C-alpha cells in the first residue's frame, strides 16, 4: 500500500466533482447506517453542514463542543447526534471526552477534525503554546491519539483533517513554533498550523494504514457564511479588498465564493467516498486530490478558484516525521502501537 510521502499520490483522480459540487452530490448513493462519526466544530459553518449531511446518510454523529449550549441550539432539529463538552485548548477536557467516548462506543468509523481558529491576536494556552497551533493541530493530534483504539476497531476508519490553502502562507517553523523569539504574525501562525494539519495526515496515514486507518487533509475552498473570520478586524477584510467602507462584502466577491454546502463537500467526500479506497495521506480540494504546487500554479487572491495546490513542504516525509515527534513531545501523548 503506497502512502503520500513527498506528495507521491498528489494527482487528480478525475472524481467527476468540482468546485461547485455540494455535499448532496458527493454523498449520493452512500449509506452510513451503523457508522459512528465525530466532527469537531460540527455546530457552525461547514462543520454543521458536514454533520447534517452525514446524519441524513444514516450515521450517528458525536459533536464535541467548547460551547455546549450554542452547539445544542445550532443542531436543534438534527437527529442522531450527541453533543459533548470538549475544549481543544484544554488537554484535560480532550482526555475526558475521549475516555467517555471509548466507554460508550465500540468503534469510531470516521473522525473529522474540523474545528479551527484564524486571525486571532497572540494568545497562549496554559502550557504556553500559541493558540492556533494548540487548537488547529495539537488538540486534534491528542484527540486522534486518544481515540486510536476505537479507530482501529472500525477496520477501515478514516481521519479527515480540515486544512486550508492557508498552509501556503507558512511552512512549519520547527525552531520557534510558539513565537517565543520571533514577532507574532497571526497569518504566519495560521499558516503553520494548517501546514501541520497536512503533515499530520501524511504521517498518520503512513503509520495507520496497516491497522486499516487512512488519513486525509483538505482545503474547503473560500466559503461564504463560516465563523472563521469572526474575530478579525473589519479593516483587515477592507485592506484585502473584499469589503466596502460599510463592512459589507462586495457582491462580485461574494459571487466567487463557495456556499456552505459546496464548502463542506470535500470534507464529506474525503470521509466517505469509495474513490479514495486504498489511498491516503493526500491533500484534497474541490472533492478531488489536489495538484502538487511546485511554483507552477498562478495564485490570484481575488479569484478564489486559483487558490489551489499543495506545497511540497506540507507533504514532505522528513517534515512529517519531525512534526510527529515534536507533537508527541509537546502534548506528552504517544500513539499506541498498532
Image (tube, rainbow, N blue to C red):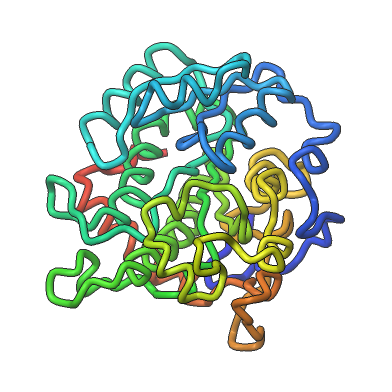
Residue visible at 66% across and 16% down? 34
In which image quadrant can residue 172 be found?
bottom left
Q: Residue at x 69, y 55 (%)?
A: 258
- Which image quarter holds the N terminus? bottom right
Residue at image location 58% in from the left, 56% down from the top: 218
- Along the horizontal axis of the image, is 16 left or right of 283? right
Instruction: Answer left or right for 139 relative to 148.
Output: left
Q: Position of residue 71 (x, y in %)?
A: 45, 26
Q: Reply above or below: 92 against 332.
A: above
Identify the residue at image location x=54%, y=47%.
Answer: 226
* Front-lying residue, 326 or 254: 254
Q: Position of residue 37 (x, y in %)?
A: 56, 27
Image quarter of the C terminus: top left
Can residue 38 be seen by looking at this rendering? yes
142 and 73: which one is in front?
A: 73
Compared to 299, does 337 lie above or below? above
Please, which residue is most extreme toward the top here? 104
Residue 278, can we see it? no
Q: Give the vertical position of 159 relative to 96 (above or below).
A: below
Number of numbered labels in the structure image: 0
Q: Position of residue 134 (x, y in %)?
A: 28, 51
In the rendered image, residue 166, in percent from the top left (x then y), is placed at: 49, 67
Q: Is residue 221 left or right of residue 38?
A: right
Amino acid at each position: 500500500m503506497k502512502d503520500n510521502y513527498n506528495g507521491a499520490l498528489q494527482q487528480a483522480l478525475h472524481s467527476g466533482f468540482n468546485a461547485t459540487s455540494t455535499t448532496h452530490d458527493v454523498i449520493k448513493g452512500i449509506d452510513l447506517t451503523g457508522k459512528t462519526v465525530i466532527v469537531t466544530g460540527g455546530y457552525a459553518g461547514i462543520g454543521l453542514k458536514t454533520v447534517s449531511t452525514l446524519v441524513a446518510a444514516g450515521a450517528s454523529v458525536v459533536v464535541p463542543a467548547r460551547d455546549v449550549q450554542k452547539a445544542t441550539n445550532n443542531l436543534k432539529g438534527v437527529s442522531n447526534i450527541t453533543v459533548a463538552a470538549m475544549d481543544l485548548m484544554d488537554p484535560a477536557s480532550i482526555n475526558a471526552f475521549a475516555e467517555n467516548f471509548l466507554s460508550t462506543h465500540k468503534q469510531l468509523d470516521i473522525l473529522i477534525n474540523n474545528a479551527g481558529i484564524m486571525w486571532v491576536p497572540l494568545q497562549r494556552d496554559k502550557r504556553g503554546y500559541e493558540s492556533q497551533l494548540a487548537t488547529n493541530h495539537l488538540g486534534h493530534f491528542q484527540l486522534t491519539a486518544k481515540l486510536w483504539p476505537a479507530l482501529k476497531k472500525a477496520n477501515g476508519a478514516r481521519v479527515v483533517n480540515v486544512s486550508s490553502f492557508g498552509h501556503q502562507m507558512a511552512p512549519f517553523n520547527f525552531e520557534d513554533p510558539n513565537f517565543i523569539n520571533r514577532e507574532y504574525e497571526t497569518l504566519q501562525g495560521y499558516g503553520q498550523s494548517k501546514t501541520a494539519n497536512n503533515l499530520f495526515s501524511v504521517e498518520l496515514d503512513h503509520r495507520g494504514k496497516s491497522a486499516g486507518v487512512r488519513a486525509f487533509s483538505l482545503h474547503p475552498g473560500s466559503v461564504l457564511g463560516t465563523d472563521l473570520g469572526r474575530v478579525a478586524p473589519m479593516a483587515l477584510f477592507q485592506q484585502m479588498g473584499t469589503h466596502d467602507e460599510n463592512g459589507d462584502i462586495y457582491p462580485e466577491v461574494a459571487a466567487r465564493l463557495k456556499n456552505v454546502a459546496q464548502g463542506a463537500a470535500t470534507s464529506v467526500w474525503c470521509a466517505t467516498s469509495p474513490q479514495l479506497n486504498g489511498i491516503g495521506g493526500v491533500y484534497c480540494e474541490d472533492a478531488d486530490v489536489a495538484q502538487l504546487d511546485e511554483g507552477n500554479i498562478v495564485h490570484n487572491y481575488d479569484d478564489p478558484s486559483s487558490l489551489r495546490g499543495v506545497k511540497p513542504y506540507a507533504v514532505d516525509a522528513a517534515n512529517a516525521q519531525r512534526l510527529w515527534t515534536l507533537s508527541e513531545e509537546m502534548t506528552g501523548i504517544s500513539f499506541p502501537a498498532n
